[in-house]
Amino acid sequence: MRPDRSATITDFDLTIMLAMHDAFRRDLGYLAAAAARFRGADPQRRNALVTGYELFTYQLRHHAMLEDRHLWPQAAARLAASPHAVAVLGEMEAEHAELDPALAAVNAAIAAADIDPDVDPDVDPDADPGADPDAGHRRLTDAAGALTGVLRDHLLHEEREALPLLKQSITRREWLAVGRVSRKEFGLRGTAQYFPWLLDGADPDRSAQVLSLLPAPVRVAYRRRWNPVYHRSRRWS
């Protein structure tokens, strides 16, 4: 029996959404670990950090954009009679706005750590002997910690309060339409990167759940091509 697309979404429909939240938390862990080791002197390590962080920020911004354009406004309109629901959904958009400066601070800290002068006069005679060799490193770890706090709090808030509202207000037809918008914006190249990123390090049950939702040709492409190519690139450290 085919599912009723006019019915509102269920936990099953949220499988990929929750997998994305897991992936964001995973990448926050990678960022914290990379920041703890980073000094900017090793170009390969810096490039790995930048590669991992750029993919993370791309996925996060795309995810937030889809929610802000297609989910929160629609849910708020359907639940307009509930001041609490409208307030929660407004908080989702406000919390997304808080992510922008936190993401930018990490970018700036990576750039600053990369160009910090060598403060060892034995290596650089022009170095400032009073400069702090760890200032850029601390700036990066502080920025990574601030981003982690903002994003983790948002994800937990969304899972506890906003996702139940989506299950009351968004139909499966509408949910699938948002998925089509996402795939169109990603294109084939973006999709080939998205699923390996999404499932990188995921537990077997989560991976099996996500892969079961994909058409057979996509699963084959993921296993035979996309995932191997993804793992050839060095990320984070």
Image (spheres, grey):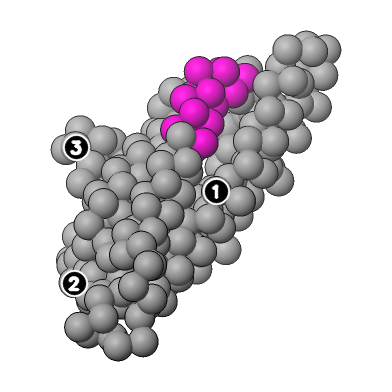
The type of residue carrying mark 1 is Ala
Residue topped by disc 1: 102
Instruction: Tell me which corner region of the image, top left, top right, bottom left or bottom right, holds residue 91.
Output: top right
Q: Residues within 10 Å of mark 2 (few under 14, many from 20)?
A: few
Label 3 vs label 1, nearer the camera: 1
Which callout, 3 or 1, points at the residue further toward the start of the chain?
1
Residue topped by disc 3: 203
Q: Is there CB contact under 8 Å for labels 1 and 2?
A: no
Label 1 vs label 2, nearer the camera: 1
Residue 31 relative to residue 187: left or right: left
Considering the image in quadrants, where does the N terminus appear? top left
The residue positioned 79% from the left and 13% from the top of the image is 83
Q: Nearer the viewer, residue 172 or 205?
A: 205
Q: In this rendering, does residue 51 appear at all?
A: no
Q: Residues within 10 Å of mark 1 (few under 14, many from 20)?
A: some
Against 20, residue 44 (above or below) is: below
Q: From mark 3 to mark 1, how far is it between C-alphas?
A: 29 Å
Provide the major secondary structure of the magenta segment. Answer: helix
Name the spot of residue 236 as percent of width and height, x first: 27, 61
Q: In this rendering, does residue 33 appear at all?
A: yes
Residue topped by disc 2: 232
Q: From mark 3 to mark 2, how far is it between C-alphas?
A: 20 Å
Name the spot of residue 214 as percent of width and height, x first: 35, 49
Which callout, 1 or 2, points at the residue further toward the start of the chain?
1
Which callout, 3 or 2, points at the residue further toward the start of the chain?
3
- Residue 98: in magenta span: no
Name the spot of residue 61 as percent of width and height, x first: 56, 53
The residue positioned 30% from the left and 88% from the top of the image is 125
Q: Quick one: SS at disc 3? A: loop
Q: Quick one: SS at disc 2? A: loop
* Residue numbers of the magenta segment: 150-165
Considering the image in quadrants, where does the C terminus appear? bottom left
